[in-house]
Image: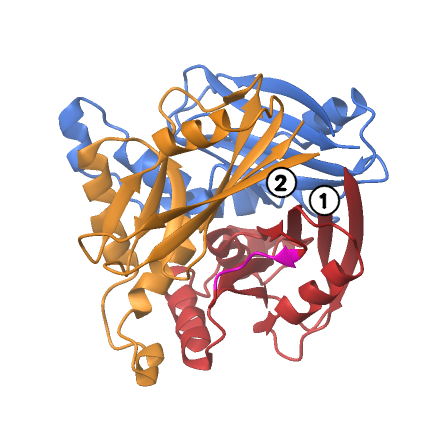
Chain colours: A red, B orange, C blue
Amino acid sequence: MKAHTEYLHFRTQDREEFVCITPQLHEILRRTDVREGMMLISAMHITSAVYVNDLEDGLINDIKEWLRGLAPSKDYRHHRTGEDNGEAHLKNLILHHQVIVPITDGQLDLGTWQEVFFADFDGQREKRVIVKVMGA
Amino acid sequence: MKAHTEYLHFRTQDREEFVCITPQLHEILRRTDVREGMMLISAMHITSAVYVNDLEDGLINDIKEWLRGLAPSKDYRHHRTGEDNGEAHLKNLILHHQVIVPITDGQLDLGTWQEVFFADFDGQREKRVIVKVMGA
Amino acid sequence: MKAHTEYLHFRTQDREEFVCITPQLHEILRRTDVREGMMLISAMHITSAVYVNDLEDGLINDIKEWLRGLAPSKDYRHHRTGEDNGEAHLKNLILHHQVIVPITDGQLDLGTWQEVFFADFDGQREKRVIVKVMGA
């Protein structure tokens, strides 16, 4: 089994920001010679998610508003530690922090409308996403 | 590492429909000689999920009703593009679009009550799920 | 590809209990000689989750309270089968039942604050989590 690992680095402008990373994932795959296998894309933080959905601004704003409803800003127990990002942890849990993209015939085997996003809910600081290609 | 890839095709009768696909996954594994590894089952769409839970009609209807509460039908920004399926995207995000089933000793290593489902939230059209077996 | 499989066993004191399992995962990895690959950690039940987040008691209680809000105790259709754990299934679906931890240079490649949890929502009975290390 071949393995190839890279880390994507982010420092978002806004506290909450979603970044489409599919183009970078295609480039990483090109730097390997894996033809069959998978790519793991996993946020290395507990207030950032990685998810797959549509690259459409209206929908991205719908998702942000929807998450604010499900995980509202409020006085969480976690804030007694000095943090103020309780809702960012909960939003991360809803969207999940990782996805696997299958690799078939040397290509990311995504559906037509599937794009991979890094979603930071506590941004404006250094964040990392590990991308690990595994296969043959 | 061996890899074997198949695609399941769906065209549901209803707009929202859940289909238990565990029997098909056992058949796919039988067509390989992988003894140890994993099976990735991933929806190739942004309005369909793949999840693991109980094959029990009452619960399946509970899940559908619960998702309607968390992601209600309403006038989403996304609908300005001509789409009318905003809530289907959000339901997909809650359930996640993929699962990994471990393979041990040539079998899908699922718990007694674990069944794999394809959940379409914007059905009545061609949908695909990729099934990729990887291992030794 | 090398594969190594172990099963973690749990019987929680409380019906709802979260257990940090990162130390056990490090030990399992030490029993293999995999340097590059991944570890799949997957609950074998439909009322238990595996998730990654912060080992901080306040936050853990925030997560429990938040899940009770999103998946309240009530009279679910599923209860007509004699079960009384409908909400446990829904909480499992939100948190997801599995995570993948990348393995780089012989170590679990987790971010500084990332810890892996087993979350039982219908505990006080025997539960299992499969841990499968795959790689080279």
Image coordinates of residue A70 in percent, x first then y, are: 38, 60
Q: Which mark is residue A134?
A: 1
Left or right: B19, with A127 as reference point: left
Left or right: B32, with C89 as reference point: right
Report how far apart the C-alphas of labels 1 and 2 lie in the structure. 13 Å
Question: As shown in the figure, which amino acid type bears the numbered disc 2?
Answer: Ile
Q: How many marks?
A: 2
Q: Secondary structure at mark 1?
A: strand
Q: Residue at x 80, y 60 (%)?
A: A31
Residue lying farthest bottom? Answer: B80
Q: Residue at x 38, y 28 (%)?
A: B114
Residue lying farthest right? Answer: C105
Vertical placement of residue A92 versus A53, above or below: above
Vertical placement of residue A7 versus B59, above or below: below
Vertical placement of residue A40 versus C19, above or below: below
Question: As shown in the figure, which amino acid type bears the numbered disc 1?
Answer: Met
Please tell me which residue lies in front, C60 or C123.
C123
Would residue A126 be seen by someone viewing this image from the given angle?
no
Magenta stretch bounds: A107-111
Q: Which residue is mark 2?
A: C100
Tell me whether circle 1 and circle 2 mark residues in contact (CB < 8 Å): no
Left or right: A110, with A21 as reference point: left
